[in-house]
Amino acid sequence: MSIRGDVLAMVACLALGLSACSGAAGDEPAPPDRAATIDGCGPIRYDDVAGRAPSYLRPPLARTPNEHALCRGRWLPATGPAFVPQGLVVRGDRAWVSGYNHRRPQAGGDSCRVIVVDLRTGAEIAHRAGVARDWSPAAPSCQHAGGLALDPHGLWLAQRGKAWLLDPETLEVRRGWRLTGALRGSYLVTDPAGRIGFGGFHPRRSRPLRWFEPALLLEPGRVELAAREAVDRQPGPPGVQGAVWADLGPGPARVWFTRSTTRCGELWGGRDRRYGFLPGAEGIAHQDGRVWVVSEATAPRYVRQGGRPVVPTLAQYDVGELARWQRSTCGGGA
């Protein structure tokens, strides 16, 4: 869902309206937030990030908007030079991170991975490469793994035209589906009613978030899911990378979206609720008044291109005073 080179990155930024994400010579980075540090949080240092830092990164961490609310950072365990993180689920001190190897696999190959991380230390708990390998009735291979969600049925994983249900402990695949018609699985989100939402990425146009009852997917013998079978739908902004249902105030609980390039990030709760966020923000999770977000900005493929900010791969923010955060400087998107 991101950009291969600096020129294409600039084009995509303009298309998204992310004016602050250009790294062209002479551009100035967005000014860091100057709000008072939240107790126990505040700008963190490179050495504060738990886990072993990737060997290709060098301190310091970049200054980023609303870093006064950045409380914790974690590096992912070593996953190889091709891995790009995408989806995120958090329960207690455990995080599930999905992603893909950007190098094109052989025909019929599987480039997806799911990693389970101890958030206290950054240590790996479990790791599965080749998510859908040797499992072929409906979705024989996984290439992107952008969507991730967890509910009592298991760990839901999705990409543009496919979805799977995994055992959250063993990471073995239990079921698989083809997503047909206009339905996309670029990101996933669940709501308090137990529904699961499938959303699609497009850099310039809004795509609807479609809600489904899990019981529909779990019907015996079902191997396809269509947009027309959704029980509800809602609009989302262009360029969505991840989403979470949360009460972040003001107003009622809602779906909050992440939008980003590898140089700029935004937390989006509506046209008048757009806040500066972690560059490269993808999957997002809410827990106990704080949000965790996973960034692709420091994936090797982007660092090699140069000009990317050094930020934690996993970051936790205190969102108790979100309404006072610095507004997004990522441009005039919808």
Image (tube, grey):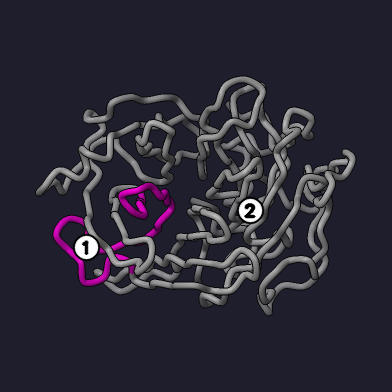
**Residue that appears at 79% across and 30% down:** 324
Residue situated in front as seen by the camera: 37 or 293: 37
Q: Amino acid at mark 1?
A: Pro
Q: Earlier in the sequence, mark 2 or mark 1?
A: 1
- The label number, if any, that marks residue 64 in the structure image: none
**Residue that appears at 54% across and 67% down:** 117
Residue that badge 1 annotates:
140
Q: Amino acid at mark 2?
A: Thr
Percent across and percent down for residue 272 are 66, 21
Which of the two discs, 2 and 1, sits closer to the camera? 1
Q: Quadrant of residue 250?
A: top right
Part of the protein shown in magenta: 131-159
Q: Quadrant of residue 305?
A: bottom right
277 lies above or below 238: below
Residue that badge 2 annotates:
262
**Residue that appears at 88% across and 38% down:** 35
* Tally of numbered tags: 2
Q: Main secondary structure of the magenta part?
A: loop
Taking the magenta stretch, the answer to whether it contains residue 284 is no
Quarter of the image for the C terminus: give it. top right
Helix, strand or loop under label 2: loop
